[in-house]
Image: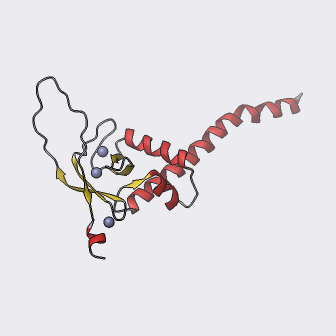
Amino acid sequence: MLHLRKKVVPLRFQHTINIMIQRKRNTKAKALVFSVLSDSASALGNDDIVSRLSGRLGRVTVYRILQGFCEEGKVHRITGDNGKTYYTLCQGCTEGFHDDNHIHFRCIGCDTVSCLGDEVSFPELPAGYRVLGASFVLSGYCPGCLST
Ligand SMILES: [Zn+2]
Ligand SMILES: [Zn+2]
Ligand SMILES: [Zn+2]
């Protein structure tokens, strides 16, 4: 009978072990994505991040991690005038509250988006409106592209 017990115990823990392995993998994957973003001076698109990771993580995994970071207030997304979404690290945002009302500049030459300047103040709105987000995106050429 003892040998039966032996079989039961590992199975009971296998689920927990799997969760632990999965968590460890997730943590590692999150760290990878975070390091790509912190190594980059400009905001990056989902596919840019995937290619910088040279195939270590898939598109869907990177996308999920980025959405998580956005919810946690670690990363903000910028939608360019080209419709593409770019991601970059936040400064001083917290979970559920983003304070990224600064100007973003998209370079049409090298397809990068940079966070520029201080907070933008926007005009007072008519009564009855409540602002939860703002997007300021300018486009043109960055200093790097203009100097070449
Ligand atoms: Zn933010
Ligand atoms: Zn450029
Ligand atoms: Zn920004």
Q: Left or right: 47 with respect to 119?
A: right
- For the residue pair 125 and 22, the one nearer the viewer reads as 125
> Which quadrant holds the C terminus?
bottom left
Single out the residue that lies furthest toward the bottom.
Answer: 148
- For the residue pair 129 and 57, the one nearer the viewer reads as 129
Q: Residue at x 66, y 39 (%)?
A: 18
Single out the residue that lies furthest toward the top.
Answer: 128
- For the residue pair 40 and 144, the one nearer the viewer reads as 144
Q: Left or right: 70 with respect to 59?
A: left
Q: Residue at x 24, y 40 (%)?
A: 134
Q: State the image coordinates of residue 59 (x, y, percent, origin top left).
A: 54, 49
Q: State the image coordinates of residue 121 (x, y, percent, origin top left).
A: 13, 44
Image label count? 0
Q: State the image coordinates of residue 7 (x, y, percent, origin top left).
A: 82, 33
Which of the four quarters of the rendered structure image does ligand 1 lie in? top left
> Which quadrant holds the N terminus?
top right
> Which of the 4 image quadrants contains residue 131?
top left
Q: Left or right: 100 with respect to 77?
A: left
Q: Left or right: 148 with respect to 67?
A: left
Q: Residue at x 12, y 31 (%)?
A: 125
* Picture colour scheme: secondary structure
Q: State the image coordinates of residue 111 (x, y, percent, origin top left).
A: 37, 60
Q: Residue at x 55, y 61 (%)?
A: 54
